[in-house]
Image: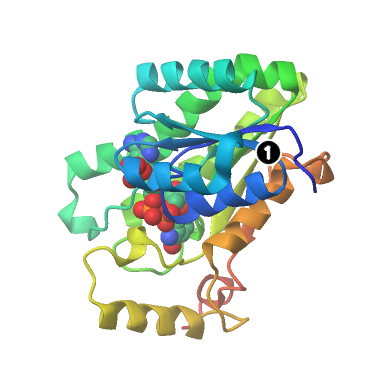
Amino acid sequence: MSLDGKVALVTGASRGIGAAIARELSRRGAYVAINYNSSREGAETLKRELGSRAEIFKADVSKREEVRRMVEEVARTFGGIDIAVNNAGVMELMPFEQYDEYKFDRMWAINVKGPIYVTLESLPYLKKSKGSVVNIASIAGLGTALLNTTFYAITKAAVIALTKRLAYDLAPYGIRVNAVAPSWIETDLTTRGRSREEVERAKADIINRTALRSLATPEDIARAVAFLASEEARMITGQLLVVDGGRIDYLTHAV
Ligand code: NAP
């Protein structure tokens, strides 16, 4: 599964799952473009860790002009783009009856428009390299029973539909498009605003609902992404790879 000499753009790689993906792709020999929006320090620390084959690029993925500039800069720096990983994302929890238009629009712009913009702007380079796109969806997009995730789930369902449709749209260029759906993973996204006790309770609850009785880690997601981006997956497109240890809450509706 070597990615030797490939150029990978990973959005939202300043921390969490994105940082783990950047590390894994780099470990497999890829040049990595570390995208960040506000966590410059995290991005710089990762760049130092990965060395001269990685560079940092600031862009808000929900703004097309910023994405265009970033993609051009990445291609100029590394001579093209082979792999685009759409990982940047946010989760705003809210009960259905407390619908907040501002929060929903922001999630939609980052989680859905972000992957659209990054893929659109990377297309000239992906066409040249016959590259691949990997989107980070979520099991939420399949309709899990997690509280207050209705609107987040809608954005991730859209990412899954986008992946399947893009696989057809881009197949004529030899570009593959796949997605990975992580389960609950301990990152800022899932721990922000929660006490240690609440996080431990959430973890125990998830483990209870998981057939393998274990939690997925950012590294588990990173290995799935590396596989889908590699030549090993050359006949795989339009697929959603669920990395969740067998979540029984949506497999059987048992809690
Ligand atoms: P995280 O720790 O909160 O990290 C989010 C990343 O997204 C950060 O690097 C952040 O960069 C970046 N980001 C946010 N808004 C951005 C924007 N407008 N433009 C560019 N980058 C932006 O979250 P995570 O848990 O690693 O999540 C990564 C992805 O996995 C997301 O798509 C999330 O929905 C998905 N996911 C997570 C879980 C989970 O349980 N953690 C489960 C399923 C799916 P800055 O800090 O630099 O702004």
Q: Residue at x 34, y 30 (%)?
A: 60
| Observer-nearest of 90 and 170 | 90
Q: Residue at x 72, y 16 (%)?
A: 128
Q: Position of residue 242 (x, y in %)?
A: 62, 59
Q: 228 or 69, which lies in front? A: 69
- Could you tell me residue 130's position as x and y percent? 75, 24
Toward the viewer: 18 or 124? 18
Q: Is residue 92 visible?
A: yes
Q: Position of residue 205 (x, y in %)?
A: 41, 82
Q: What residue would you read off at disc 1?
A: 30
Q: Give the number of marks.
A: 1
Which kind of residue does numbered mark 1 sit on? Ala
- Position of 20 with respect to 14 (left or right) is right
Q: Position of residue 10 (x, y in %)?
A: 53, 38
The color scheme shown is rainbow
Vertical placement of residue 154 versus 196, above or below: above
Q: Give the residue drawn at x 45%, y 78%.
A: 206
Badge 1: few (under 14), some or many (20 or more) residues near its Cα, within 10 Å? many
Q: Is residue 144 above or below residue 34?
A: below
Q: Is residue 32 visible?
A: no
For this view, does 95 lie left or right of residue 139? Answer: left
